[in-house]
Amino acid sequence: MTVLNNIGILYFQEEDLSQAKDYFIKAYQKAKLVGDEVKVGYYAVNLALVSNKMKAPDSAQIYIDEALPLLKNEPKVLVTGKMAQSEMFLLKKQYAKSEDIALNLLPKFQDISQVENRVFILLVLAQINEDQNRLDKALYYGIEARNTQPGVENREEVYSYLSNLYGKKGQLEKALVYKDSVIIASDSLADIRNSKLFETEKVKFQIQNYQHELSESKEVLKQERRFFYSIIGITLLSMGFILWIFRSNSIKHKQRKTIVELELAKEKSDYLLIQKQLHEQETLALLEQERFKNELEVKNRKLTAKALYLSSKNDLIEEVLQSLSQNTEIVENPELKKQIRELKKHLKTDTQWDSFFTHFEEINQGFLDRLRHKHDKLTPSDIRYITYLYMNLSNKEIASLLNITPQSCRKRKERLSSKLNIPDNTTLHNYLSMI
């Protein structure tokens, strides 16, 4: 972008405005492409200046309107844009706007480095007044431009303007003096321009040489790119071949994996079938066990009912005997008294115990054998008490069956716990249930 703009400036200085505009437009378009707003504004100002020189103020206004908002933070370039705007309004004969801008800019050009800009603005002000037939004021600004002592380039322009202005005023002698000065300045300017032309041609040659080197570099880059693309193509083909091999192996591996998974699934299915059969067998065994248990509970309930019946029968007989013993007539009768003693003796030696014991062994097979094996010092009376206790009868019910008091039953229970060496944290019934 900068190189294109510099070439445009060279053409602008040589007054080859068409070429200058072409290069400025190229630089302007590249700046827009990269989004550099400051350079877009800068190159738009250059295009506005060229448009003014080409007497195309409408085109210049388009570029100025775009450039000025982009150059708010670039005061030096903004001033150049304002100068172009003032000249543009002059060409459009909007003298008030042009003069207002020029008068605002003039105080800013007091420094010696701003001589060319000051001469430019003074000539604009002179032209504004000349166009409005204010020749004295135009002459004032022209003389101010001459007194600013510009370079040879600007001096020729100033002298030429003053010569024409004096001619308009009818002061032909002064017009001829400035005309001679223009010729002298033109000769000096021609020498300077020839020197600058040599420098310009030298720069152009360097630019062309640079473009030639750039073209050669592009060709080398193009060849390198072809080689690079060839390498990439070979690499991609190699990678494709490797991927194809990898994919083939992957497919084979997946097939083998599928076969193994199917075999494992079959083994798992067989295992689950066996597990199911075992579970069914266990379920049948549990059901059978539950059936036996239910049958055992039913029989134990029958035994319990029988034991309770015996208990209630003995209680009833006890109450009857107790009542009879308190009757004086029966007590005085020796025969009845003897019968009462026989009944009491019969209660203590209940023959139905043997039948109950036989049924208990049938229902709870092996319990009494395990009990005798583990505790061989137990007496028949102890075993009978333990049998009632195993059936979970209460102390009162056991006392009735054994024809003893409930308190004696409790004491007997404590003696048996001690005799069987049962721990303190375990009840006698729980211990018996574990045998």
Image: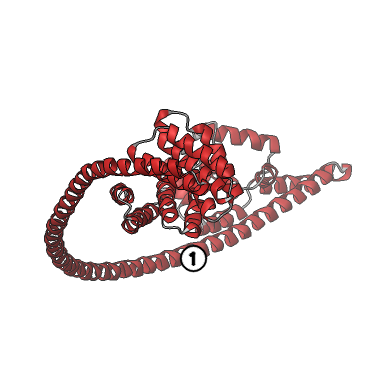
Q: Residue at x 44, y 28 (%)?
A: 111
* Residue 233 versus residue 121 in the image, above or below: below
Which of the 4 image quarters holds residue 135? Answer: top right
Whether residue 156 can be seen here: yes
Which of the 4 image quarters holds residue 332? Answer: top right
- Residue 17 located left or right of residue 264: right
Whether residue 376 can be seen here: no
Look at mark 1 in the image and give the residue it sits on. 287
- Residue 248 located left or right of residue 30: left
Q: Which one is nearer the viewer's eye here, 256 or 308?
A: 256
Extreme residue in the top direction: 111
Q: Which one is nearer the viewer's eye here, 202 or 196?
A: 196
In the rendered view, how is the structure colored? secondary structure
Q: Which one is nearer the viewer's eye here, 370 or 287?
A: 287
Q: Residue at x 70, y 38 (%)?
A: 406
Image location (x, y in percent) of residue 363: 52, 59
- Residue 195 located left or right of residue 357: left
Image location (x, y in percent) of residue 417: 54, 34
* Residue 24 versus residue 283 in the image, above or below: above
Image location (x, y in percent) of residue 133: 58, 49
Q: Which residue type does callout 1 highlight? A: Leu
Image location (x, y in percent) of residue 168: 50, 49
Secondary structure of the residue carrying numbered label 1 = helix
- Residue 376 located left or right of residue 313: left
Count of labels shown? 1
Circle 1 Cα neighbour tier, 10 Å, few/some/many (<14 / 14–19 / ≥20): few
